C-alpha cells in the first residue's frame, strides 16, 4: 500500500511538472510571437508607412463672391534628413499639383546639411507665392527621445539642443518671395481676392505673439483672412478665430504619428483634441466657427522614424465658393 501511494504521488508530481513545462512553453511561444509582431509593426512603420507619401485633397468653400477659385498647397513637418532621397524626389514632384499659394507650417529640417537639399527640392514651389512660419525643429536639432513620453503630455524644450542655421533657410525663403508670418501680418492680392495673412512664431516654444490681421480691406467682401501657426494650441486658435480668421492652418501634431486603427491619434503634443490631430475640421471661438486645417506632416522625428495608421501627407485645398 505504501509503495502504491508513493507511485501515485510521483505520477501526480510528474503531471504537475509536465503541465508547468507546457504552460511555460506556451507563454514563451506567445511572448515570442508578440515580440515578432511588434518587430514587424516597427519595421512596417519605419520602412513602409513612413515613406508612403500621400496627397490629401480638400475643398475649402470660403471663396468671396466674384473671386476666382484658387489652390493652396499645405506643407508641414518635413523633418528632412540628408539621406532621405525618396522624400526629396517626392517633394520635387509636388509642383505638378500647380498651387496658387503655398502655406508652410514649419519643422522643415532635422540637420544643417538638409538645407541645400531641401531648397533644391522645393525650388519650383519657391516661384509660387508662399507664406511660412517656423517650428521648433527649424531652430534646434533633434535629440534622442522615448516616444512613450508624449503620452504624458506635450514635450518640453531641452536647453542642450544645438541650434540649426535657421536664418539661412528662412532668408532664402524670403529672398524667393515667401512671406515670413512669424508674429507678423501681410496682405497680398491673388486673382482679385485680397488675402490678409497673419501668423505666429512657434507656440510650442512659447514664442507666439499674435500680431493681428493687417488693416481692414477697402473691399471686405473680396478678402480672406488666413491664420497660420506651427503648433495648434488652443490659445492661438482662439485668438485667430476671435480676430476674424476665415481659415487657420497648422501642423506639429504629425497626425499622432502612431495611431490606433479605427480609433485614431493618441496624442497631439499640444492641447488640441486628439480627434483633430489631422484633417480639415473646424474651430469655434468668440461665437465664430471657421475651418481648421491641420496637416499630419511629411516626416517624423529622426529619433523616432516610425508611422503607423498615419501616412505622411501634403495637402491640396481648392478654395471655392460656398455651395
Image: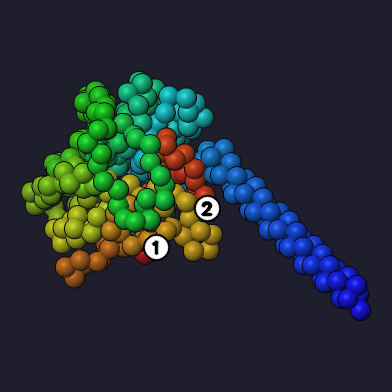
Q: Quadrant of residue 261?
A: bottom right
Closer to the camera in the image, 1 or 52 = 1
For label 2, the crowd category at 10 Å Cα-Cα, with few meaning under 14, some 14 to 19 and many 20 or more, is: some
* Quadrant of the rendered image containing residue 44: top right
Name the residue that disc number 1 marks.
275
Residue 279 appears in the rendering: no
| Residue at 75% across, 59% down | 21
Location of the C terminus (image quadrant): bottom left
Residue 20 at what x, y percent from top left? 73, 63
- Looking at the image, is mark 1 or mark 2 earlier in the sequence? 1
Residue 77 position, x and y percent, is 36, 40
Instruction: Give the total of numbered labels.
Output: 2
Q: Quadrant of the N terminus?
A: bottom right
CA distance for labels 1 and 2? 14 Å
The residue lying at 41 percent from left, 51 percent from top is 148
Circle 1 Cα neighbour tier, 10 Å, few/some/many (<14 / 14–19 / ≥20): some
Task: Say which residue label 2 marks.
Answer: 309
Residue at 30%, 59% (x, y): give it. Answer: 272
Amino acid at each position: 500500500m505504501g509503495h502504491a501511494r508513493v507511485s501515485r504521488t510521483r505520477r501526480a508530481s510528474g503531471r504537475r511538472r509536465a503541465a508547468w513545462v507546457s504552460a511555460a512553453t506556451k507563454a514563451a511561444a506567445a511572448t515570442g510571437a508578440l515580440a515578432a509582431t511588434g518587430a514587424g509593426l516597427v519595421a512596417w512603420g519605419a520602412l513602409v508607412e513612413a515613406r508612403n507619401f500621400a496627397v490629401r485633397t480638400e475643398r475649402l468653400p470660403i471663396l468671396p463672391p466674384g473671386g476666382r477659385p484658387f489652390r493652396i498647397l499645405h506643407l508641414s513637418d518635413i523633418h528632412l534628413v540628408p539621406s532621405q532621397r525618396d522624400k526629396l524626389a517626392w517633394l520635387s514632384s509636388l509642383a505638378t499639383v500647380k498651387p496658387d499659394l503655398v502655406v508652410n507650417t514649419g519643422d522643415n529640417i532635422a540637420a544643417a546639411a538638409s538645407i541645400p537639399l531641401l531648397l533644391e527640392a522645393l525650388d519650383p514651389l519657391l516661384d509660387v507665392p508662399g507664406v511660412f512660419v517656423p517650428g521648433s525643429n527649424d531652430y534646434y536639432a533633434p535629440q534622442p527621445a522615448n516616444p512613450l513620453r508624449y503620452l504624458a503630455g506635450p514635450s518640453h524644450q531641452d536647453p542642450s539642443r544645438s541650434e540649426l542655421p535657421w536664418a539661412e533657410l528662412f532668408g532664402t525663403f524670403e529672398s524667393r518671395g515667401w512671406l515670413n508670418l512669424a508674429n507678423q501680418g501681410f496682405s497680398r492680392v491673388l486673382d482679385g481676392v485680397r488675402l490678409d495673412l497673419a501668423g505666429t512664431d512657434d507656440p510650442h516654444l512659447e514664442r507666439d505673439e499674435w500680431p493681428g490681421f493687417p488693416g481692414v480691406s477697402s473691399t471686405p467682401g473680396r478678402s480672406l483672412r488666413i491664420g497660420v501657426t506651427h503648433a495648434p494650441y488652443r490659445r492661438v486658435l482662439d485668438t485667430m478665430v476671435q480676430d476674424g480668421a476665415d481659415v487657420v492652418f497648422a501642423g506639429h501634431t504629425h497626425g499622432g504619428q502612431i495611431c490606433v486603427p479605427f480609433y485614431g491619434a493618441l496624442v497631439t503634443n499640444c492641447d488640441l483634441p486628439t480627434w483633430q490631430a489631422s484633417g480639415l475640421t473646424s474651430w469655434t471661438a468668440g461665437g465664430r466657427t471657421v475651418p481648421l486645417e491641420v496637416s499630419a506632416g511629411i516626416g517624423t522625428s529622426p529619433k523616432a522614424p516610425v508611422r503607423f495608421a498615419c501616412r505622411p501627407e501634403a495637402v491640396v485645398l481648392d478654395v471655392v465658393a460656398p455651395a
